[in-house]
Amino acid sequence: MSVSARGISAVREFNRFYTQRIGVLKQGLLDTDCTLTEARVLYEIANREQVLAGDLVRDLSLDAGYLSRILAKFSRQGWLKRERCDQDARRSFLYLTAKGRSIAQLLDRRSREQIGGLLEQLSPEKRVALQSHLQSAKALLGAESSAGSLTIRQHRAGDIGWIIQRHGAIYAQEYGWNSEFEALVAEIGAKFLREFDPSGERCWIAERDGVAVGCIMLVRHSRTIAKLRLLIVDASERGQGLGRRLVDECLSFARSAGYRKVTLWTQSTLTAARKIYESTG
């Protein structure tokens, strides 16, 4: 499938916007003498143990000659020291000197201050939304799922609004569904809040490092039958088993609440969700 010119332009436009906002086009990054690449190499050496030049070439997709010149510059400035590897005398581990660590810490502090300044301009809700979108972008572009903590909790104030928004946005983007579906989700959410019975109903929110990335709901259909509703998993978490965990949480509560059966309705296009439902009976 060919990539549209519009999609390419959108990514390039964002790249131009963001590189300008964080100042990487300036001669020195964060008012230092370091280029962006040099700052990244410093960061990696400072935050790894027993790092080899080959590791940086592989992990950062750097040209070996270019990296060698960067490391030579660090050595001349007194930022870098090397220790021979006992297993292979031809290779050396890279470490920062006290001077090198101070430069790395300066860059890290200024970077945090810069990003903090950008985020201060946003409301708390927009900060959470931005973090979620960034995680989704990483997942869509092939990055591994974040190693941060994943928790599943019961709903609280504001969560139903998030559920409505995410369903509307994701289903419009991925399936082309219109606002009628979002209105349906809003009706389900409003009914849940108005008639919520904690003895037999629940809504769970999955969070990664405090950012909502999934949800599921169980509501009463009759005395012995419950209904599973509004399962959704953010793109950043798909393929990691979160959908199955949410369904298992739902079914476990249904059993403890005394239900004999759990029902649901779904669409033929939602193949991933259907596989989860079928696997759990």
Image: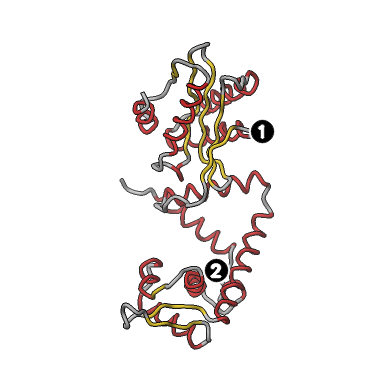
- The front one of 148 and 13 is 148
Amino acid type, mark 2:
Val
Q: Could you say where residue 109 lies in the image, as x and y percent from the top left?
A: 63, 68
The dot on residue 81 is none
Q: Name the kind of residue labelled 1 in the image.
A: Ala
Distance of label 1 from label 2 (alpha carbons)? 40 Å
Classify residue 245 as left or right of residue 152: left
Q: Quick check: 235 above or below 95?
A: above
In the rendered structure, the answer to whether residue 205 lies left or right of residue 278 reads: right
Tag 1–tag 2 contact (CB < 8 Å) = no
Q: Is residue 247 left or right of residue 197?
A: left
Residue under circle 2?
24
Which quadrant does the C terminus fall into?
top left
User: How far across and down, in percent of the image, does residue 161 sit?
Assistant: 61, 32
- Dot placed on the residue nearer the N-terminal end, 1 or 2: 2
Residue 24 picture quarter = bottom right
